[in-house]
Amino acid sequence: MPAAHGTGGSASIELAAPDDWHVHLRDDELLAAVAPITAMTFRYALVMPNLVPPICTTAAAEAYRRRILDCAGPDARPDFTPIMALYLNGDLDPDDFLTGVDTGVVHAAKYYPAGSTTNSERGGDSLGGFIDVLERMAERAIPLLVHAEATNPEIDVYDRERHFLDTELRPVVERLPELRVTVEHLSTRAGVDFVLDNESVRGSITPHHLACDRSDLLANGLRPDLYCKPIINSADDRRALVAAATSGSDRFFLGTDSAPHPASDKYGANARPGIFNAPFAIPVVAEVFNNAGALERLEAFTSVNGCRHYGFERASDRIRLTRTESGSDAPVADSVITANGDRVTIFGVAEARLWTVSALTEAPAG
Ligand code: NCD
Ligand code: ZN
């Protein structure tokens, strides 16, 4: 279970409805199973393009956006909006991408180092190799989303974020200081420092990197459900992430990196990286902020900073989060079953027992 580091107790807080600035919704049966959960929990969802094959064209992004909305289900927020990004590789045609941005279909490009994570095989070998398209993005203030992990096998898995930032992202940011960059799913103190050192850079942070460290993953029986990329790192790294998220700085915001995989892909040899946390992401971050004594800064992290960076207004409707000291006996699901019988384990069940989330005002129609 995610480590508890605070005193707990009863608590209650109101927030503008949250957005998720990094989510994997997959396709087909898995999409049908997980899209309704994101659509009822979050107003905007920045959807990752790492399908197989990846989403590299505006037409593919538009078709995927429609499939997502078709699966959003009856309980979706009326203003639920998938925000689409294209997968940056040699198949991305810059003119098509910029047209997609001009027509409002596409909002960003996502760079994956090839081989770094799930469905990154079609990613790039070097971020600097895309400098022409990055220049055009910088000119037009189009956000670049970066999976910041070195893939050189000689680099230790716990150092891969720092190494990528130093050797690949830093030269690009120095050459294009206007380029708006999000270092996705920050996992290290080095990552936090990189964001703070570079004016044009922001960082998304996941619930699991805030709540867990690598001892949770490895020390008491191997926990494949906590295996993700970038790998959950040390206790000191976790402290740096919690300090950044709870600091009130507008450079950090929530991106759940909710990444569902069927149990058959998680619990064998070659378990795939990815943690499915969309259902209880908000209870998990509420617990982290409450433990840090920073509940009053939760709204900036979940509902304000990301909108500001991506150029949207915060939600006008509000939710209330309530913590009950003794927890609740109400049943809390620990997995989702897809139409073809696959089970996907949900992260954050313990926090979901402690926190209830209720809508205070109705979400406006989208
Ligand atoms: C993600 C996935 O499963 O698509 N996995 C993960 O461990 N986070 C890909 C990613 O964001 O790295
Ligand atoms: Zn991801």
Image: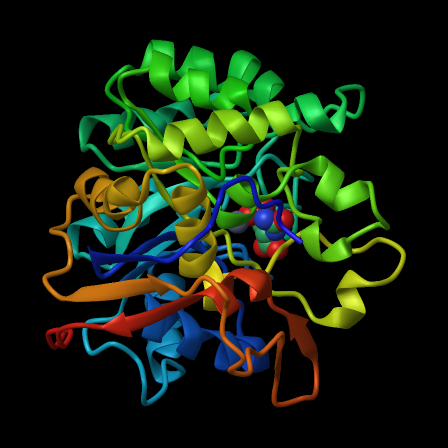
Residue occupying the point 82% across, 63% down: 267
Residue at image position (22%, 43%) is 310
- Whether residue 25 can be seen here: no
When the figure is inspected, residue 30 is found, relative to residue 304, above or below; the finding is below
Residue drawn at x 52%, y 58% is 258
Coloring scheme of the render? rainbow
**Which quarter shows the C terminus?**
bottom left
Residue 362 image point, x, y percent: 14, 77
Q: Where is residue 251 in the image (x, y as percent from the top left)?
A: 29, 29
Report x, y in % for residue 11: 33, 56
Question: Looking at the image, which is closer to me, 353 or 178?
Answer: 353
User: Within the image, what quadrant is residue 357 found in?
Assistant: bottom left
Indicate the quadrant where residue 309 lies: top left
Task: Left or right? Give the position of 364 relative to 265.
Answer: left
Left or right of 118? Residue 28 is left
Residue 267 vs residue 61, the one in the foreground: 267
Q: Nearer the viewer, residue 200 or 314?
A: 314
Give the image location of residue 117, x and y in percent.
65, 44
Residue 197 in the image: above or below residue 311: above
Question: Across the whole image, how many numbered discs are drawn on residues?
Answer: 0
Q: Which of 283 and 190 is in front in this view?
A: 283
**Can residue 309 be seen at all in this image of the molecule?**
yes
**In the picture provided, is 118 more to the left or to the right than 33?**
right
Q: Residue at x 60, y 23 (%)?
A: 236
Image quarter of residue 179: top left
Quadrant occupied by the N terminus: bottom right
